[in-house]
Amino acid sequence: MIKTVATTPFTDQKMGTAGLRRKSKIVMQPNYIENFVQSIFNVIGDLSNKTILLGGDGRFYNDIAIQKIIKMAAANGLKKLVVAKDGFISTPAGSVVIRKYQLSGGFILSASHNPGGENGDFGLKYSNESGGQVPTSVSDKIQQETLKITEYKICDCEDIDVSRLGNFKLENMEIEVIDGVKDYVEMMQQIFDFAALQKLAASGFSMRFDAMNAVTGPYAKEIFEKLIGFKDGSVVNFIPKPDFGGLHPDPNLVYAKELVDFMFSDKAADFGAANDGDGDRNMILGKGFFVTPNDSLAILTDNYKLIPYYAKGIYGVAKSAATSTAVARVAKAHNIGYYEVPTGWKYFVNLMDSNRITFCGEESFGTGSSHIREKDGIWAVLFWLSIIAATGKSVEQITTEHWQKYGRSYYIRFDFEGVDTAVADKLMADLEAKLPSLGGKTYGDFTVKEAKPFVYNDPVDGSTTKNGLVIYFTDGSRIVYRLSGTGSSGATIRVYLERLQTKDVLQNPLDMVSPLGKIALDVAEIPERTGKHKADVIT
Ligand code: G1P
Ligand code: ZN
């Protein structure tokens, strides 16, 4: 039943910050997925002794792509495919499964926080045996392969029923359909003190978790309501839908509006949280209070001793260059290693594998630890609840006390979306050329200390990555510019602003960073070049 199909290359199959992400309609073109997956199989080489995980966030086209990949894996002689029931697994749960069962790798079908549906986005991430996405050296090889592919192999057979747990065979390939939720829940029970969390829930403390009609609904129901005992209805939008019910499943102040409105109303719960489409991002809210992901990383790191899994001690901590320096001050106080990496979770993997770091995070609502090799939304929520359970303090109290102790990095990100790619590329190139001339210049209260591209030398594999342009000011403030690597069309220019205050910690963040915003727009000539005088999204 195996057939070999002739094909021609697509020239746009280069993976971005996190896998291949494109408009659904592009991915639905004949041979698009097939070419990409065959290229990965070609790079892996011999599949006869390999076991690979397959699952996704349930978005539109997930089911069809899953069937294609099953049939291709069998035709390419894979030993075994572990498929999540209904094709359904969160990104962190996928990492748990790969690591726990020592699989060779995995395909996670997801475009993360991007909208889904026929007019939305689709994506495919490929992980190796670490449970994290492959490094650039491998994704580059895969891209080379996509450019020269001439044929792919696929079984000409009926669809496989992945709605029932169990073992099957297709050609010589074993298929095991597993529960995508169970192993993840068990891992969370090993990390956190569930008895303490049950006490918190029983004390009348209330929470709301918004699964945004995406993959974390079943995980959150099981963990927060069933196992911990928060009351029924604490988890909302918990039924995963192929188009996320029209939501843009990105847990931030803009897109998680329903939760934000609720948490800032007089009916607010004591604690609020949301996750993204594939369950790796998180947003944390208190009553009428928002915690930036930058501060969240710093606060979790500072409180590691409260969590059984970390209590004996942690290795260092890492953040992406665009993320604020809040966690750097915590690392210093605890005398642990501290690393700054390019944007993208894959850059944390080597640091975790070599025991250099335990925690890591990004400003883009990603926080995680070395329990897996992806960021982990529900993990971050459980960590916060555990701090609350142990200290008896509110989210707002925990955060403000943290600022009083460590100072506050006021931080806001501005996104200029839908910019013409050529315009954006030229803006970045011209800005880079101009950086050396900025040193020593004064803009109002701010004097430039240094301005240069961010260059990362991986201490483990020796690779060098350049990502983003940074202006450092003498008072510790920073402006970071970079182009998004996850968009499915056009360019998004991201401008990250950070301003450090050691004493004045209760001001409005937008007011605090707005002088930097003006400098950022002027220096890069954003209005002149893009026609945009203000950002499309501010988070
Ligand atoms: C964005 C975030 C980045 C994150 C990635 C995947 O990438 O900025 O921190 O790792 O999504 O969730 P970007 O679009 O900026 O390349
Ligand atoms: Zn995600």
Image (cartoon, rainbow, N blue to C red):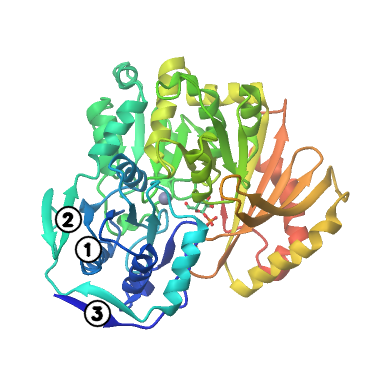
The residue labelled by disc 1 is: 70
Q: Give residue 30's position: percent from left, percent from top.
A: 30, 79
On the question of residue 130 being in view, the answer is: yes
What residue is disc 2 on? 175
Q: Is residue 267 visible?
A: no
Q: Is residue 174 left or right of residue 107?
A: left
Is residue 329 placed above or below 43 in the rendered structure? above
Answer left or right for 66 relative to 522: left
Labels 3, 1: front one: 3
Q: Nearer the viewer, residue 175 or 393?
A: 175
Kindly identify the amino acid type of the residue bearing the numbered disc 3: Thr
Alpha-carbon span between mark 2 and mark 1: 9 Å
**How many angstroms separate mark 3 from mark 1 (CA)?**
15 Å
Question: Of 236 and 302, which appears nearest the observer?
Answer: 302
Residue 293 position in % (x across, y down): 53, 39
Q: Which amino acid does label 2 sit on?
A: Ile
Determine whether the residue tagged by mark 2 lies in a helix, strand or loop: strand
Residue at which label 3 appears: 4
